[in-house]
C-alpha cells in the first residue's frame, strides 16, 4: 500500500450496479471505502428493489439505508462522497478509472465472459463469477455458484461454469424465472412486491401477454417501458418471500460481497 495511506482512503471502482454489484458496493460503503459504480445507459435490472442501477433512471436509489446518486461527470464524484453517498455514472467502458485511479476495480457485470477488464486496470482487480481467469484477466476471482464454494476466493484459475439453472426456491427453478420469448417493448402490468397467482398476466411484450407460471411474490420485475431482446430476464417470482424482502439484499449476494471485502483486505491490510 502507498505509504501512510489508510484503508478508508482506498478508491474502489465497481463495474455494474446490478444485484451483485450493488451488494458489493453496499458492503464496501458500510466499511468506509470510497467507491464509484459504473453502468450502461439503460440497465435492465429485474430485482430492482436491491439494485443501485435504478439511480440511472431515477437520479438516486436507496438500499438498506445506503444511497447511490447519479453523477454526470467524474468531477462530481467527490461531492457525493462528501455527502456520504455512492456516486454512480453512465460509463459502460469504465473510463472514469483514468480520472479516479482506483486502487481496486471490481468487475460485477456477470456477463459470464470478460467484456474488457484487464489485469492492469488497477493495482488490484477482482472478477465476479465465471469468465475470468485469476492471474491472466484479474488478480482474484470470487465464486458465485450457489454451493459450499459461494464467496470463495480463487487466486489461480477460474470460477465454476454457470449452470444456467435458477436457484431452487420452494422446489421451483425455471418456473419462477421468466425470460422474453422474443424482443420488443416491455410493459409491466403489476408492481414489484405484488402477490401473484399462476396464470396471472404480469406484463406485455408488444401485444403478447407475459403470464406467471407459479404463484408467489413478484420479487423481480423489469422496469416498464424498456426495449428488450429475446431471452432477456424480465420476471422473477419467489414462492417463499415476504413483501419486505424486495428491498433487502439476499444471502448469496451478501456472501459474494464478503468475498470481495476479504480480497481487498488480503491485498491492502498488511503489516
Image (cartoon, helix red, strand yellow):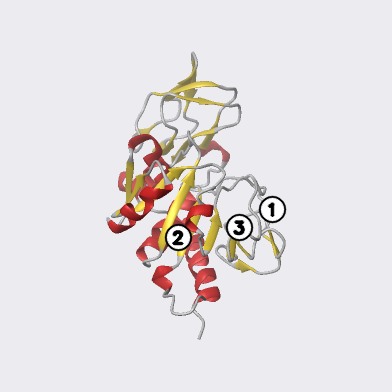
Where residue 149 appears, as percent x and y from the top left, is: 60, 65
N-term mark: 3 or 2 = 3
Could you tell me how far apart the alpha carbons at marks 1 and 2 are, in whole angstroms?
20 Å
Where residue 105 appears, as percent x and y from the top left, is: 54, 59
Nearest to the observer: residue 14 or residue 238: 14
Image vertical order of residue 72 relative to residue 227, above or below = below
Nearest to the observer: residue 47 or residue 34: 34
Residue 161 marker: 1
N-term mark: 1 or 3 = 3
Nearest to the observer: residue 198 or residue 150: 150
Q: Residue at x 54, y 42 (%)?
A: 92
Q: Is disc 1 in contact with disc 2, using a CB cutoff of under 8 Å? A: no
Q: Residues within 10 Å of mark 2 (few under 14, many from 20)?
A: some
Image vertical order of residue 9 relative to residue 86, above or below = below
Name the residue tied to disc 2: 254
Name the residue tied to disc 3: 121
Residue 117 marker: none
Q: Residues within 10 Å of mark 3 (few under 14, many from 20)?
A: many
Q: Residue furthest top?
A: 207
Of tags 1 and 3, the one toward the viewer is 3
Q: Is residue 76 left or right of residue 164?
A: left
Amino acid at each position: 500500500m502507498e505509504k501512510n495511506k489508510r484503508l478508508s482512503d482506498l478508491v474502489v471502482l465497481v463495474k455494474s450496479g446490478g444485484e451483485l454489484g450493488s451488494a458489493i458496493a453496499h458492503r464496501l460503503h458500510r466499511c468506509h471505502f470510497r467507491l464509484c459504480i459504473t453502468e450502461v445507459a439503460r440497465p435492465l435490472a429485474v430485482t430492482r428493489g436491491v439494485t443501485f442501477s435504478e439511480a440511472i433512471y431515477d437520479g438516486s436509489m436507496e438500499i438498506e439505508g445506503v444511497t447511490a446518486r447519479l453523477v454526470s461527470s467524474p468531477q462530481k464524484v467527490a461531492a457525493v462522497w462528501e455527502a456520504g453517498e455512492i456516486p454512480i455514472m453512465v460509463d459502460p467502458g469504465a473510463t472514469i478509472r483514468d480520472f479516479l485511479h482506483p486502487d481496486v476495480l471490481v468487475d460485477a457485470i456477470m456477463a459470464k465472459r470478460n467484456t474488457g477488464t484487464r489485469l492492469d486496470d488497477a493495482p488490484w482487480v477482482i472478477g465476479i463469477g465465471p469468465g475470468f481467469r485469476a492471474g491472466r484477466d484479474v488478480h482474484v476471482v470470487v465464486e458465485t455458484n450457489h454451493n459450499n464454494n459461494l464467496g470463495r476466493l480463487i487466486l489461480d484459475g477460474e470460477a465454476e461454469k454457470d449452470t444456467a439453472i435458477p436457484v431452487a426456491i420452494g422446489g421451483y427453478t425455471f418456473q419462477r424465472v421468466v425470460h422474453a420469448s422474443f424482443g420488443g417493448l416491455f410493459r409491466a402490468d403489476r408492481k414489484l412486491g405484488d402477490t401473484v397467482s399462476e396464470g396471472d398476466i404480469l406484463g406485455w411484450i408488444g401485444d403478447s401477454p407475459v403470464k406467471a407460471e407459479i404463484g408467489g411474490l413478484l420479487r423481480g420485475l423489469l422496469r416498464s417501458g424498456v426495449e428488450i431482446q429475446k431471452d432477456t430476464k424480465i420476471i422473477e417470482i419467489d414462492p417463499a418471500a415476504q413483501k419486505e424482502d424486495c428491498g433487502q439484499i439476499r444471502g448469496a449476494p451478501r456472501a459474494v460481497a464478503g468475498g470481495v471485502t476479504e480480497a481487498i483486505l488480503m491485498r491492502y491490510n498488511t503489516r
